[in-house]
Image (cartoon, rainbow, N blue to C red):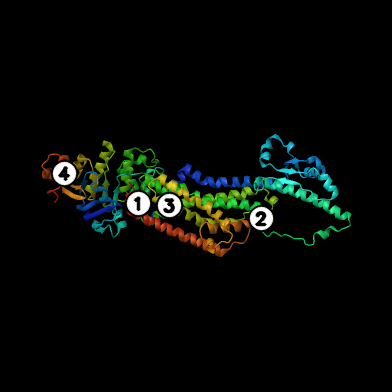
Amino acid sequence: MIQFKALLIKELKEAFRDKRALMVALSMGLLAPVMIMVISKVMITESVGNPPIYVQFTGAEYAPKLIEKFEENNILQFANVPEDDKYAWQERGIEVDIPEDFAEKMAEGQAIDVVLRADFGKKSSSSPIRRVRETVRSYSQAIGYKRLLVRGVDVKLLRPIILQEQDTALPTSNAVMVSMFLGMYLLMGAFVSGLSIAIDSSAGERERNVLEMLLCQPVSTLKIVLAKMTCASAVSVLSIIIMLVLTTISVGFIDLSKIGATFSLNAFSIAALLILLIPLCFFATALQLFFSFQAKSFKEAQSTVSMLIMLPAMVPMAIMMIDDKPAWVNWLPISGQSMLMEDVFKGLPVDWTVLASTTMMTIVMTVALVIMTSKKLKSEKVVMSLS
Amino acid sequence: MIEVNNLHKSFIDKKNTVKALDGLSFTAKDGEITGILGPNGAGKTTCLRTLYGLLKADEGSVMVDGINVLEDPLAVRKQLGIFPDKFGLYERLTAYEQVDYFASLHGMRGTKKKAAIEQVFKDLEMEELAHRKMVGFSQGQRMKVTLAQALVHQPKNFVLDEPTRGLDVMSTRVLRNHLAKFKAKGHCILFSSHVMQEVAALCDRVIIVSNGKLAAQGTPQELCDLAGEKLLEDAFVKLIGSDEGVAA
């Protein structure tokens, strides 16, 4: 126990005295809330506001009333676009063609083809297209209703069934985006924050010739690995706590309810997130130590271990793609945590059995990695590559 | 007391096998300074690493104060003070913290630890260095810190791997005086070196290792007599150059 304490204190001293590495480690925690705030701000203005849309009308003169309707909804002629936004709207290239015989056909009660031409797959065009479509639809419906009314027909006859849509998903898709970002940041934070410290205390020490001296001391390699893991994990846990606290504060400054989001981090959900993420921090550093102890140099360790950062970025993505998830996905580290985090953000009750099984699985894998690493440190291959 | 018996060690690669130790045996007694001499690649470092328990011998045994390294490497390391060939320092720690760290690894604690650390700093006349961060320490200062950390737990046996490399005269003298003091207290000192004058001046017994085998052993004078040379350096070259006869 004295040995472990000495090992740990030394690791912590070294980690906290390397100011630059520490700043890099904690920068994840400091940057995430800022990013989330900026992203949510952008989303709110996009989805709530009714910004002007500029559309290339051809044959506008044939349907002045329709154009008026468009203008009411802030859908304007392309000719009026301000110079700053010109390029963006040209890029989107939304066109509406009104036929020459618009007035004629309208008078005769024939169907009129108004063409909406745009790249429907472009994300930036989706909201303008929706608004153009909505405007034409409501204008056309209004005229249709009037026609029926004039003929003495009850408009209700047109709608024998009304579908009442009730969305049970608590937040809207935009809020899901915000929480997805935070979830991804938290996973990345767990993986990245301890990274530099894990590499420095393993491959770095080997390069500075202090690892051999340590291995010659009467101390078991298991204690060495445990101390190094605890230190690097402590830093990533710290980074995650900073991230959560700052996010809670910064989210308070933006009115997410405007986009129908009920995104709130209360004490309970923060606690749940920490229970989820702390074992993951240990798993991440155990994984990093496992690889960087085997690397021959600091540089080699850096390049191998950097590949591991892909894990927290790719796994949640992959899970989102799969619609019918097999049950074991719930138990694996990273994937289990990312799914549980989604629930927490949605405000759903935490599934404690899933949480327990994921945490258990993460701990088991961490222990296995630690034992393997400490075995590796005893192997002759590691000793031979010391110098 | 360090006893090395019939040590064999091969490194097997995909392509070839290197025999680093080929039946090396010697004894380093308490109260004596034993020097290991040998050309580069003779197996000195392999032998010392086997002694620390970092490498496992294919055959033979190493006993330190009656404890077999193979059976209980941690217990053996407790008996050893190690001065490695490439010593690194934790540059973000102070000298005191580093020595404290190694003292704790040897299980020392409390006032006893504190007293031991202060004693070793006093012995090595490095009190003014104690609370400075070690980044930028000179080679001599680094040697002193390494020496302090190796000696802080008062080991019975002291192993040094080419300790004088890169040291100036003053630092070498400090080291030499310290070894002499240690010898006088009845400790066992094993020390590998390339510097003939060093070995001739310090060592009670010299072990010459060549090709993983014992080439010759004895006092520096005995070795000179054996080879029929006046200088240890000439004797050394002659002894490792001739394969037959001298290996007793």
What SS does tag 4 mark? helix
Task: Point out the tag, 3 or 1, that comes first from the N-terminus.
Answer: 3
| Viewer-nearest residue: A137 or A386 | A137
Q: Amino acid at mark 4?
A: Gly
Q: Which mark is residue A289?
A: 3
Q: Which mark is residue B241?
A: 4
- Mark-to-mark CA distance, 3 and 2: 39 Å
Q: Amino acid at mark 2?
A: Pro
Circle 2 is placed at which residue position?
A171
Q: x%, y% of residue A19?
A: 47, 42
Q: Which mark is residue A382?
A: 1
Q: Amino acid at mark 3?
A: Leu
Residue at 68% x, 39% y: name it.
A90
Chain at tag 3? A
Q: Is disc 3 in the same subunit as disc 2?
A: yes
Task: Point out the tag, 1 or 2, that comes first from the N-terminus.
Answer: 2
Q: x%, y% of residue B230?
A: 12, 39
